[in-house]
Image (cartoon, rainbow, N blue to C red):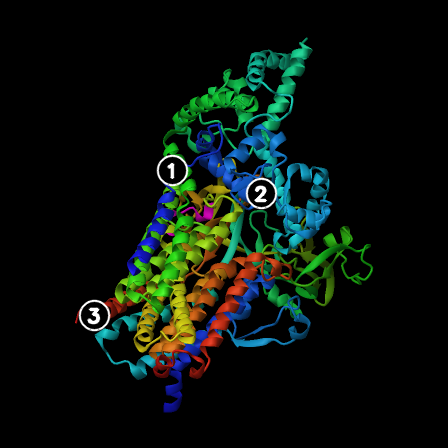
Amino acid sequence: MKALLKIFGSIRLTVTLLALSIVLIFFGTLDQVDYGIRHTQEKYFESLFAFWSYPPQWILGELLGDLPLPMPGGYLIGPLLILNLLTAHFLHFRPNWKKSGIVLIHTGVVLLLIGQLVTQLVQEDSYMWLNEGGMSNFLESFHEDELVIIDRTDQLKDDVVSIPTSLLKRPGEIQDLKLPFQIKVRSFFPNSSIVKRADSPQVQSTLINRGLGLDMKIDAREIPVTYQPDERNITSAIIEILSREESIGVWLVSNIFDDRFPAQTFTHAGRDYKIALRYKRRYLPFELTLVDFTHDRYPGTDIPKNYSSKVRLFNSRTGEDRQVLIYMNHPLRYEGLTFYQASFGKDDTASMFQVVRNPGYFIPYLACILTALGLLVQFTISLTAFAVKRSK
Amino acid sequence: MKKYVAIGIVAIALIVALGGFLPVRFDSSYDIEGFARLPILTGGRLKPIDSAARNSLLIVRDKQTFKNQAGEKKSAAEWLLDVTLRPELADTYKVFRIHNPDVIDLLGWQKEKAEQNGFYFSFNDLQPALEEIERQARTVNPEAQLRSPYERQLVKLRQSLILYNKLLHSFRPPGAGVSDLQTEYRTYHARAKQGMKSLADQQANRPFDNTTLRMFLAFAQRYKNLADNAALRIIPPADPALGAAGWQSLGIGLIDSIRTDSLDPAIMSYARMVDAYRAEDPSAFNDALKGLGTQVEERAGEDTGRVNYEYWFNNYQALYRSMVIYVLVFVLASLSWLFWPQTFGRAAFRLLALAFVLHTFGLLSRMYIQGRPPVTNLYSSAVFVGWVAVLSSLLLERLYRNGIGSAVAAMMGFCTLLIAHHLGRGGDTFEMMQAVLDSNFWLATHVVTVTIGYSATFLAGFLAMIFFARGLFTRSLDDGTARSLNRMVYGTVCFALLFSFVGTVLGGIWADQSWGRFWGWDPKENGALMIVLWNALILHARWGGLVRTRGLMLLAIGGNIVTSWSWFGTNMLGVGLHSYGFTDKAFLWLCAFWLSQIIIITAGLLPARYWRSRTALGRV
């Protein structure tokens, strides 16, 4: 036990872990060229082990391409660093003013690591597009999709049942208590291209017998998943609705079928339903309306000087109704969400906000204050010691 | 004897430093300086014509000067004057630099012949191939990062040609037939009203004067063409309060005169200047320029102070001069370890102070001209990294007085300014800031601290290089020197950790304030974090007794690799790492630097018997 404690509290382990984290970050940066930031982050920083493979297009790629280089991932190095630090403190440090800075620095570093872990676990990234004059009360996810069955019988309100795509990947039937029927996933494509059935004879699917897939004679064909930051996967599925083992119909749904396409609807037991696969939405307890979007450039250039969105915020619950301005380095923070100006389009008449929710946002601040304080204390102590030594 | 040598060297340096204060003389009867000083607006920023000409020539020719047909070296302002006012001459100047053999083939030139001209081509040389260049340039890979050297050269050539054409359209409507621009403008102005009336009549299906209308439309077309193609906005705002947004191109000014019903006097003054230059009448040219100068300055408002300063700063070349002196310092400091340590050591320190003053002066001037904190782009980061390194080394030299601080300062000052010089080849180094970076507060805090972190990490690495150079190749690395180097490197690494950590964290806070996220694992962020971790690793290895002097030095050299990756490597991701990008020049230099550091590390690992200074190594 003592020997184990000694290993975990050793500075040798600290140095090793620091070296390993540098290696991890290096390869985690390198891989972003091919896989984009998000995928790389999952692969390297949110995993126990990561494997880097030599890109085949490099020199000697054919020889080295098949040999993956293993390394410990972020979820292994981080906890080990924390363990190492805590053990070392309990083993070696005795209360001593001269070391107070170091304790502060290390507490800060532990908090930074914990803060990053919290962020990676709970942070949600989504976005909202608004046209000038347009209103919205929901956010859309950058990467996730959802299958929704909407009961539209009531004219005044929609009843939405949302099924995450992770459930669609499994075989079997899905039953939701709110729905009087079962959902059977016949096929699921994480990324696909939508093809005319006539042009693509190898698409066997004659399953589709309702909705867009039937009317437009289209089908989905699976293609490799993309990781490019500026591309989104076209997620599609072929869904059968069953009532007591009897088929009501088979639909093709895809997140590319947006508002420009007619809704896919059906009636069952006297109620009207709509079925769709769409970008995962999160409804807000308030709504935003884009009043005006402006985009200035430096005179005589295309270099953007400023983007700015004038937005009306309306919250029916609190009765808040006010104007806010969202521009570069000046986001809107409201109800735990941060809206910042991320993009624009349609000849400067539409604006996109990236929206982040991170309940742990304050942890890094706390960590920074502690560490900065610690560094200050420690360097003052060292400098004074140095000055005293020199003056002697 | 010693004394005279030292005085002589200091005198040379002073001549280098003070030489810039001599007025620039142009070998011309035309008032080139008056022309070069005129303020104009391009790239979103008010600057003297001199800067616009230099930056354009840099893009086209990779240099700020050119040679005319007689082989005389001429200034960029003279080139611009000929491009726009006497294109028949400028078209014969060999200014387009093309070094890619495939593009030279495309032009139908044999390599030997191109080589004779130093790979420079005149517009007339390119004329027959213009269509082919355009056609080929349209087929290049739309992803800039994936382009082959041939495609890059093509795109660059096409951009140079477009720029050349845009400069041509900046001061007068092109066309060989025009000899009297003032008369043309007056005719246009006199007929504009009637022309507008005829146009309105025609559109309302009323009877109209066809001759007047056709003449008017021809003018309008001519000036619209001018407005669409001008690179420079030369007409100052009617009211100085309008600022940068009030500047107009000549074409817009001419079209606008219909609305205001008056010809802007600046347009007429420019026309007088153009006519005089085309008539080869220097005295009339100089006269016109004098009137123009006062006119433009009055209307440009308070910004003219900066413009004049920028003109002077362009000619003084403070950073170039300090670079030359850094070389002298390095030679002196290295000599001081071999003989005359006192004399050479002191002379080196004095010269270093002089070079540092020039370097500081260059840095402050750039801040004044741009109105921004010192680091705004890669170019200015190189200037600043050097400045911080030299300042820190000066302090080290004051503390230790062993010539090491001077030598390292000179090495780093020279290297960083050389890097800056090459980075500056892309054109204007005072670019406008993208909206997202437009925050002086964060530029002054996060960017500056992170850059100081780079600088300190490099400083530790360069100090370590001195340790190995002296230890391996000379007998001068005694115990005392090794010990003081150890302390210098240790102190510098502490300093580096402090700044790189604080800088990285400030970046996180900026990101959280602006985008609601503290950390995004983006390449530049990761690079900064790697520097923090590397410095932390060095310190822990030392505190834990895992390394002693030699190990500390080896790790410090590793810091050079990590920092150069973070500084430049991360910017080349997508360039250097794609299969085609390997030919990218900057990437090759970066690889060469890494290789050199790996060689030093390998050499540093050699057993003591291969070292010339054995005594020191025995104890470290």
Image quadrant containing the N terminus of chain B: bottom left
Looking at the picture, how far across and down is residue B310, in whole percent?
A: 41, 39
Mark 3 secondary-structure assignment = helix
Looking at the picture, how far across and down is residue B180, in whole percent?
A: 58, 18
Characterize the magenta stretch by its predominant secondary structure.
Answer: helix
> Which residue is denoted by mark 1 in the rendering?
B309
Which residue is located at x 50 percent, y 64 percent?
Answer: B593
How far apart marks 3 and 2 lie (CA) works out to 57 Å
Which residue is located at x 65 percent, y 49 percent?
Answer: B115
How far apart marks 2 and 1 lie (CA) works out to 25 Å
Q: Which residue is at the front of the view, A345 or A4?
A: A4
Residue B60: assigned label: 2
Residue A257 visible somewhere in the drawing = no
**In the image, what residue type sits under mark 2?**
Val
Looking at the picture, how far across and down is residue B133, in whole percent?
A: 70, 43
Looking at the picture, how far across and down is residue A186, in whole percent?
A: 71, 65
Sooner in the amino-acid sequence: mark 2 or mark 1: 2
Mark 1 secondary-structure assignment = helix
Left or right, B89 with respect to B607, comes to: right
Displayed quadrant of residue A254: bottom right
Residues drawn in magenta:
B435-442
Mark 2 secondary-structure assignment = helix
